[in-house]
Amino acid sequence: MTVTIREVAEAAGVSVSTVSRAFTAPDQVKPLTLKRVLEAATALGYAANPAARSLRGGGTGTLGLIIPDIANPFFPPIIKAMQARARRLGYTVLMADCDEQEADEIETIASVSKRVDGLVLWASTLSETRLRELAGRIPIVVVNRDVPEVSEVRISLAAGISQAAEHLRAYGHRKCVFINASRPELARGKSIHDSFEAAGLALTEIGPYEPRFETGVHAAPLILAHNATAVLAHNDLVALGVLHQLANLGASVPGDVSVIGIDDTLLASVSTPSLTTIRISPDELAVRSVELLTEAITGRDDDVPARVVEVGSRLVPRASTGPAPNR
Amino acid sequence: MTVTIREVAEAAGVSVSTVSRAFTAPDQVKPLTLKRVLEAATALGYAANPAARSLRGGGTGTLGLIIPDIANPFFPPIIKAMQARARRLGYTVLMADCDEQEADEIETIASVSKRVDGLVLWASTLSETRLRELAGRIPIVVVNRDVPEVSEVRISLAAGISQAAEHLRAYGHRKCVFINASRPELARGKSIHDSFEAAGLALTEIGPYEPRFETGVHAAPLILAHNATAVLAHNDLVALGVLHQLANLGASVPGDVSVIGIDDTLLASVSTPSLTTIRISPDELAVRSVELLTEAITGRDDDVPARVVEVGSRLVPRASTGPAPNR
DNA sequence: TCAGGCTATGAAAACGTTCCCAGGAACTTT
DNA sequence: AAAGTTCCTGGGAACGTTTTCATAGCCTGA
């Protein structure tokens, strides 16, 4: 039924060793022989059995990707980019969603870790102890978790935030509301308050709430009550909630209030008005995490030190921000 | 380093056969022995090696899912639901995006097919011949492709469409525009024109275009030019383009024009106004396709006949539809 | 011409399971 | 008490690769 290396060997009149070498180390076999083997292989439609290969010890050729929630529109472009990148390096990506539940994450990791050569853990809910222990068993890269001795891709919103502050200042805004729902990358380094103050903007924080559309809906009247003319929302989804409710309240965007989101998801580009937002490049995120992971996998035994790379952000100005109203 | 069945056997004082049975056929081993084995296994942190297992012939425990584009917000909820469903049946899901390119799809299938027990192909770009040939090698389920002798999950928009027509009629609309971008499920059965005519609505079709936001933007003025008071868009994304441009043109929704999307993606629920749309249940889609696939896998040798199941649709009324303006 | 060093190939072990085949023990049944 | 069942367990082959080791042929240089 399924064609094995043995049949190829027979067809080409060589031993199985030679066939194996023809695929894994072509330079070790005489050109003429190589040609015969390859021809026989294609004629028979041979493809190596990954199970046998990985059983023998050659790794699985698969990278695991653990994501808290695929339904969050932030992730699909990243997954896509990681797949593309991994494929170019000869890897397959095994993606698993674990619903932001720690129990699910543990179970998922357990079932997946034997099928992959390494794991990228996005915003893991696991404790630091657990993560280090896991790192001892299998190469891992964490995104947006700060664990000593574990390779990490760190998102920095600093640039985007200060561009946003500058953008609003230039438009003459003075009071701004920040709708907080806990982003780990905002807890690091220079605080968002400092950035806004540096631009001469008063920043009122509300929350922390859950990062949902309804949070934005709920926050909209509070913005008006604070006499603020600008809002920075936890992410695009929350910003859309704000947009929605401001419209219901008869406030115009950006006429009365300017709104800024974070993530630059599909939502931002298709809303009305289109949403000014802070973009974190999915491609860069993908490239970096795959890079770190493959590095950790290849240098497994001569243990390479854990690395931390930072991925920056940029403001994407669109139609939801404009001059502050003069009162 | 990694703990094998042999070490568990040693620790429990039994043979490897017994340990194997303890996991694959627990009722064939004496309760006392079973307990000893299980205890030894957990104490050592044993987990079966999937490579060895599948090499031996027991399948891979993985289902493959080939998707044209994860960035399309229609898919993430489906992927999520499939994973959840598959997990309950003891399967892992290997999802691959192939960018709507036939070449990518072929390559992806080739690299994935040896790692999975079966494949769900969503809106495959492959020819019928190729699909049948593939079906001969590995169990497959196609979604939204009509291939004789291959199991299929078929999306039916009939119910949703006729509900939409009825909904618009009840609101007093008489003229409607349909923005077409080629959905295979609309080409089947009773045509959309018939459904609308049955409700006494005149339907003008424009397109077919690409299913993009800009298509909706482009279509908006045409709707007004046609003096239509309602639009049915190819999907939510296109509908959002319509919403966007109607706002720019000073037309109110639903005051001047009612807009209906298809898919009920995240986009529909977070737009302003929220979008009336036709929902296709992701859970049902997931459950059905997993069901068909596992059926095909289990009954592999006593070849079960190909099955076709249909998944229906429903109108989700929201704020983008309302009474027709009286002129 | 011969020692030594390449190069190309083959034989065979090993990876961790599962499962068929046997065989022993403990019961029934006659 | 012998024969037949049933239940439980162990031995060992097999799955398809990769890779180590060995070998045979060829070439190089003295």
Image (spheres, coloured by chain):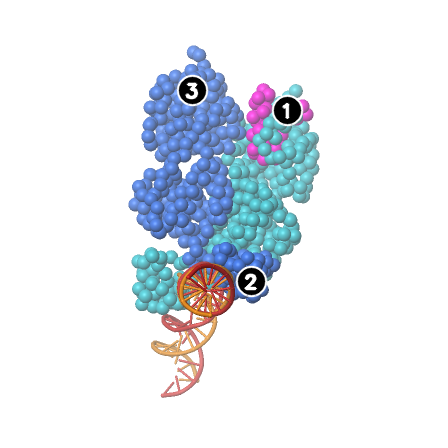
Chain colours: A blue, B cyan, C orange, D red
Task: Choose top left, top right, bottom left or bottom right for residue A225.
Answer: top left
Quarter in which the C terminus of chain A is drawn = top left
Determine if marks 1 and 3 fall on one subunit: no
The subunit letter for the residue under badge 2 reads A
In front: label 3 or label 2: 2
Residue beneath disc 2: A8
Task: Choose top left, top right, bottom left or bottom right for residue A182.
Answer: top left
The subunit letter for the residue under badge 1 reads B
Closer-to-camera residue (A138/C30): A138
User: Which label number is shown at residue A168?
Assistant: 3
The type of residue carrying mark 3 is Leu
Residue beneath disc 1: B221
Part of the protein shown in magenta: B224-253
Q: How far is mark 2 from mark 1, CA to CA?
A: 63 Å
Q: Residues within 10 Å of mark 3 (few under 14, many from 20)?
A: many
The subunit letter for the residue under badge 3 reads A
Mark positioned earlier in the residue sequence (3 or 2): 2
Q: How far is mark 1 from mark 3, CA to CA?
A: 33 Å
The type of residue carrying mark 1 is Pro
The image position of residue B39, as x and y in percent, is 32, 60
The type of residue carrying mark 2 is Val
User: Which label number is shown at residue A19?
Assistant: none
Q: Which residue is drawn at 47% across and 31% down?
A: A264
